[in-house]
């Protein structure tokens, strides 16, 4: 008798919707060849995927592709949260891309198809129950981004960024696969829960040098994906060379995917006593280096990229509590995992709002420019600047950006509950450092414009930006979402803890 269960198509519905969106986009572009229709199909598909993920997740956990108690697909509250957030981020980035797509700077069909393919990987990633599904989903999320980064016509910077991103990602994937192969050689299992059970029940396996190498390689490979220091060097150059909407996707959906993958293997498969110290060191290095280097940046996207590196450190910080015995109790571990995912959700919403604000203040298809280009923007475009300022203040963790404030409080509380007061202190100190550059950018929006070459010339600067309706909608929706999450943060934390 076969031990494989019948396929639960309801559990797979979010993946069907995401993959179906990519197919429909391809067919629409092929048969109709109307850019507007292609964009509408992609947008409706992303929205449908988000709704489908929420509906399936609300019905309780569903499992499929199971062999006995081990399942390759586990769709519950956390998977629904990840799938819905990735789909909504895709919808937002698609909206930010409309001005550039209308200007013919990127081919519409290919752009929307690749974005939908990447969304499919993100949706599958949240429900992955084994290493093969996890890695394939992560690569499905990442592979289209190589092309999207370099898809802008006539841009040498985009081509260089795409090549950098490709080379680093190939190395990261190779390292991750090698770690997974060594772990399989040690345990004979690939399902995450089975791996965790085997390593917990058989201490002799944890002491093997091969196991240590496997754990190290897996962590290093996934650390590349979240741009954790010292595996971060690719991120600033890639973000700055990519089109603004693609940089927004890299900084939000791609980073969320890397974190979900890392969280899955740390929570369910790898021994906490081995991963905890490594994650604590990575968290300290990442937040400290990210914040210190961000202080010196003059280009807007590079500053957001380095701040994104620092934010990855805050996300990893709760997992560093696993280094201590007090952080490995069931209650402390659950709080740490929930805090890491909840912080990531708050971060990606605020980050998308920040990129939407920059996009709204720059000419269609232009890069992020320099900080001097944003000076005095509030005098010309008060509402756009106010939305960008709110996002930056939220990322800094100050009110009225309550979502960012709650996120940092959640991380600190999880660290204190896990006995890692020293790491909570590092988080607090880095949060203070981060205030300097977030508030500097925010203040620049209301400062007098700089005369001369630093000022944006007429027709190319912020003063001449026509606010495309869909960009305005994305900016407004992300701002409202950030405010709502700040007022009802426990909802996200509860979903992250499932």
Image (spheres, rainbow, N blue to C red):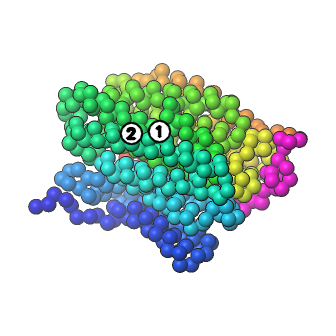
| Magenta-drawn segment | 451-476
Label 2 vs 1, first from the N-terminus: 2
Q: Which residue is mark 2?
A: 175
- Specify the farthest residue to the left: 1
Contact (Cβ within 8 Å) of mark 2 with mark 1:
yes
Q: Mark 2: few, some, or many residues within 10 Å (few <14, many ≥20)?
A: many
> Is 28 in the magenta?
no
- Specify the farthest residue to the bottom: 31
For image coordinates 56% across by 60% down, the residue present is 91
How far, Cα to Cα, is label 2 from label 1? Answer: 10 Å
For image coordinates 49% across by 74% down, the residue present is 27
Is 68 placed left or right of 25 in the picture? Answer: left
What percent of the width, then of the height, locates residue 465? 78, 56
Q: Which residue is mark 1?
A: 224
Q: Quadrant of the N terminus?
A: bottom left
Is residue 226 visible from the viewing direction of this image? no
């Amino acid at each position: 008798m076969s031990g494989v269960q019948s396929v639960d198509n309801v559990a797979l519905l979010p993946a069907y919707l995401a993959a179906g969106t990519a197919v429909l986009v391809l067919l629409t572009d092929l048969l109709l060849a109307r850019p507007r229709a292609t964009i509408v199909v992609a947008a409706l598909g992303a929205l449908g995927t988000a709704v489908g993920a929420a509906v399936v997740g609300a019905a309780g956990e569903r499992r499929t592709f199971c062999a006995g108690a081990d399942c390759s697909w586990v769709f519950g509250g956390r998977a629904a949260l990840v799938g819905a957030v990735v789909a909504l981020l895709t919808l937002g980035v698609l909206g930010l891309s409309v001005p550039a797509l209308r200007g013919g700077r990127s081919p519409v069909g290919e752009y929307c198809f690749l974005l939908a393919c990447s969304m499919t990987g993100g949706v599958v990633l949240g429900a992955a129950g084994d290493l093969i599904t996890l890695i394939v989903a992560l690569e499905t999320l990442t592979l289209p981004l190589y092309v999207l980064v370099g898809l802008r016509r006539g841009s040498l910077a985009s081509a260089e960024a795409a090549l950098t991103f490709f080379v680093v990602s190939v190395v990261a994937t190779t390292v991750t696969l090698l770690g997974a192969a060594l772990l399989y050689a040690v345990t004979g299992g690939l399902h995450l829960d089975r791996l965790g059970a085997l390593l917990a029940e058989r201490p002799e396996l944890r002491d093997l040098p091969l196991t240590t190498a496997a754990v190290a390689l897996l962590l290093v490979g996934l650390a590349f994906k979240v741009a954790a220091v010292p595996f971060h060097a690719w991120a600033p150059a890639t973000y700055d060379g990519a089109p603004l909407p693609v940089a927004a996707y890299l900084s939000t959906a791609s980073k969320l995917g890397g974190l979900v993958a890392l969280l899955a293997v740390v929570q369910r498969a790898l021994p906490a006593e081995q991963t905890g110290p490594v994650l604590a060191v990575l968290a300290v290095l990442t937040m400290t280096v990210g914040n210190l280097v961000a202080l010196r940046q003059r280009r807007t996207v590079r500053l957001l990229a380095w701040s994104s590196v620092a934010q990855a450190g805050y996300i990893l910080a709760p997992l560093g509590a696993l280094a201590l015995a007090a952080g490995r109790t069931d209650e402390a571990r659950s709080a740490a995992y929930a805090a890491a995912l909840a912080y990531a959700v708050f971060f990606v919403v605020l980050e998308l709002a920040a990129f939407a604000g920059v996009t709204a203040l720059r000419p269609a298809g232009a890069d992020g420019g320099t900080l001097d280009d944003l000076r005095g923007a509030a005098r010309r475009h008060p509402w756009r600047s106010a939305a960008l300022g709110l996002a930056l203040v939220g990322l800094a963790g100050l009110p009225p950006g309550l979502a960012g404030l709650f996120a940092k409080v959640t991380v600190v509380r999880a660290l204190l509950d896990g006995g890692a007061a020293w790491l909570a202190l590092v988080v607090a100190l880095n949060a203070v450092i981060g205030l300097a550059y977030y508030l500097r950018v925010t203040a620049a929006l209301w400062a007098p414009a700089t005369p001369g070459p630093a000022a944006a010339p007429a027709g190319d600067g912020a003063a001449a930006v026509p606010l495309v309706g869909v960009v305005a909608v994305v900016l407004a929706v992300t701002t409202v979402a950030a405010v709502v999450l700040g007022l009802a943060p426990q909802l996200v934390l509860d979903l992250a803890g499932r």
